[in-house]
Amino acid sequence: MILPVDTAIRREAFDWRKYRSLIIEGAIVLALILLLIFVVPQFLVSIGQAFRVNLLGRYLSLAIVALGIDLIWGYTGILSLGHGLFFALGGYALAMYLQLQPSGQLPDFFALYGVTELPAFWQPFSSLPFTIFAAIVIPTIVAAVLGYLVFRNRIRGVYFSILTQAALIVFFNFFNGQQKLINGTNGLKTDTTTIFGQTVGEPAVQWSFYMLTVVLLAVAYGVCRWLTSGRLGRLLVAIRDDEPRVRFTGYDPTAFKVLVFAASAGLAGVAGALYTVQSGIITPKSMDIAFSIEMVIWVAVGGRASLVGAIIGTLIVNFAKSFLSESFPEVWLFFQGALFLIVVTVLPGGLVGWLRSQGLDYARTLLRGKQRISTYPSLEEDPDVEYERQDLTNRKSDG
Amino acid sequence: MLTGLLDGLFSGISIGSVLLLAALGLAIVFGLMGVINMAHGELMMLGAYTTFVVQNVFKSFGSPWFDLYIFFALIAAFVVTALFGLILERGVIRYLYGRPLETLLATWGVSLILQQFVRSVNWVLVTGIVLFCLLFFGALQILSRRANFDRIRNWAIAILLPLSSAIAGMTGIFLGQTYKLAMTRPWFGAQNVDVTAPKWLRGGLPIGNFQLSYARIFIIVLTIACLVAVYLFLNRSAWGLRIRSVTQNRTMSACLGIPTQKVDALTFAIGSGLAGIAGCAVSLIGSVGPNTGQNYIVDTFMVVVVGGVGKLVGSIVAALVIGTTNYIVGSGVLSNLFEPIKPLADFFTFFATTSMAKVMVFALIIVFLQIKPAGLFPQKGRTVDA
């Protein structure tokens, strides 16, 4: 069979222009990875703030949760107040593996409660592949089951948020109360345990965890980018904006919501595992109500429906937190409360949203000294028209 | 065994009545505006602290008055929290209608601020806040009389905000340095404070080998009184009629000339006031701290979810059922009941602590929502979103 000439040629020539923006984005991400691994830590060490490298590593792993939350809240409009649950499940999975090292011996704390035999559900965690699998899959499954049971009944909005919060409390109670199974309030320590024969708290091991975090954050970004672009991404936004209409057009929102909720829980699991090894301990406190809502504010500050915004927001808020609670511990809660209020009322799009909608115009005005003209000069520069527009925006912001 | 169940029933009702009292305001507000108030628990805490203050004031009045302080405390708690709720609604929430998830986050911010506020409130802070409000809002009020206010508004805020906060801050620092500890000592501090119940509320009524404390009975009576009051208000008064009509159909009510903004403000104030009363009641059965509110929020939310919106009876049944189930499962009555059947008894023993009972109750709620997703008594209608 002879192919028509033009298709044959088209197959030959790879259309670079189509992928140009994607390639540029990939290059930027790669550059940022290299920057975070080779430049930033060196810089922090050189100004005598070496411990900030560890903090940065932790916050980068928190950024992975923020990506997940952005996926469900920013894109799909599902507000989960229970992501600490998935975070903790991932963290506990890895901590259990570490507790069982080097050779599957009984962790020390069991002796305190007179337990002499390893509980059955600990057994599989002596293998690393299973643990890694479990840290991602267990949160995913929990989220999928919870999501399916709730979304199936078209429970959404505030109801869903409250239910996730209740689920969080339930798991908190479970982990907090079961001392003989999982060491209760004290949690599982990881910094004195060993991995591949080396102590987890060692700087060299921590350094490799830091690099792993950076790489996994990039991978998570890629996954989210892939999920939110294309048809699936548009469908998610459609569910956010008008779920009944999506249903009327023949799609089943439940399946997509469960999928995206589960994916975001999986991301939270990864983040939990990475955070645990870098902070040295996982306790039920990571299933605190406040911590899970804090995760939402990271995304809100950075900008909903913007993956970069989620990462930036996480870093900004957490560094602000560590700075403020070091120097003025009482102020932090006031500040955080004010942050919630301001972000919601004044800055609903977050930093990135503001940059997109107004910041660019501001910058342009500053650079050129006058505003970009989109219609006719006579219209744009007429003071009356300008006044009308101002008045209109004022009224709009008044609600 | 029967006494055990009866005991469980009494305790369940008394736990349930606290839950109901706490959830009542939340349910009304949620039914009307679709807004979940995460600061509801903190409003309860505010009510409890008001009780503490009133108690201290009445302590100085001596014995006959001190026995009656609780009634004044109830009124004071209602007024204080209702006023605060009014400010909250006018200042924040009314800008967020139609965006329930954002409202939830904003009220969470308010709850954080309130928690820290009771920890660190002192004369310096109060003077600073009052001064700031006077300067900032006063100046805005004066400026708003100018004809070109809309045009200069953003500039005015940009100038006034740092200016008035600087003046307030400086005054605060000055006061703190001149009067030292008298001004800077926190009123309550981070520790829990204790409210001593009046003499006639201590002790309890013996029923069999089980004692029902008078404080609990008082709370049950208080709950019933509040329920009756709310029922009468909603069903017999003109404003109640308006509230019900806005709950059913906001747009249509607005078209018929009902001032929905006023209705919202009023309802939010009443809901907050009920939280204050609940806080007053809670202070009778335990000590009160900045985190008191946090202990109640999830349970009260569950009452709203299970009860459904728009009907009081839903909240009542939900609160009593959740309270009773919680107690019966948590106290291990069931594991005694199923003694003969070993695996079942083991199963219930596993859940026989207060925290594990919550695990089971949550599982039951999820199962329940599979059958009735909109709660016990859902509102009937033909909206798409139902």
Image (cartoon, coloured by chain):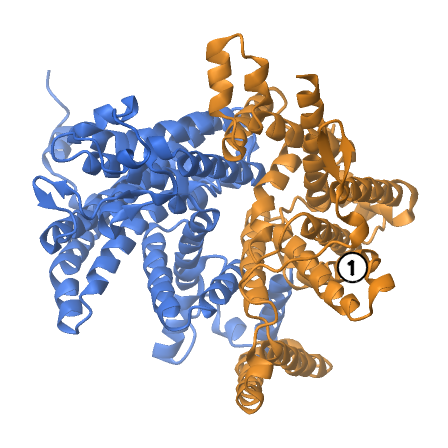
Chain colours: A blue, B orange
B332 vs B209, nearest the viewer? B209
Q: Is residue B192 visible?
A: yes
Kind of residue at disc 1: Ala
Q: Residues within 10 Å of mark 1 (few under 14, many from 20)?
A: many
Q: Position of residue B33 (x, y in %)?
A: 69, 46
The quadrant holding residue A82 is: top left
Instruction: Look at 59% across and 47% down and name the residue there.
Output: B100
The quadrant holding residue A351 is: bottom left
Q: Position of residue B378 (x, y in %)?
A: 71, 28
According to the picture, the residue beneath numbered tag 1 turns out to be B73
Q: Residue furthest top?
A: B340
Taking the image as shown, residue B384 lies to the left or right of residue A352, namely right
* Image: A384 above or below B351: below
Q: Quadrant of the C terminus of chain A?
A: bottom right
Q: Is residue A250 visible?
A: no
Q: Position of residue A115 (x, y in %)?
A: 29, 28
Taking the image as shown, residue A300 lies to the left or right of residue A346, namely left
The quadrant holding residue B71 is: bottom right
B185 vs A337, nearest the viewer? B185
A245 vs B75, nearest the viewer? B75
* Image: A35 above or below A370: above
Q: Position of residue B38 (x, y in %)?
A: 59, 50
Q: Residue furthest left?
A: A197
B147 vs B205, nearest the viewer? B205
Chain ID of residue with mark 1: B
Q: Secondary structure at mark 1?
A: helix
* Image: A157 above or below A296: above
Taking the image as shown, residue B204 lies to the left or right of residue A66, namely right
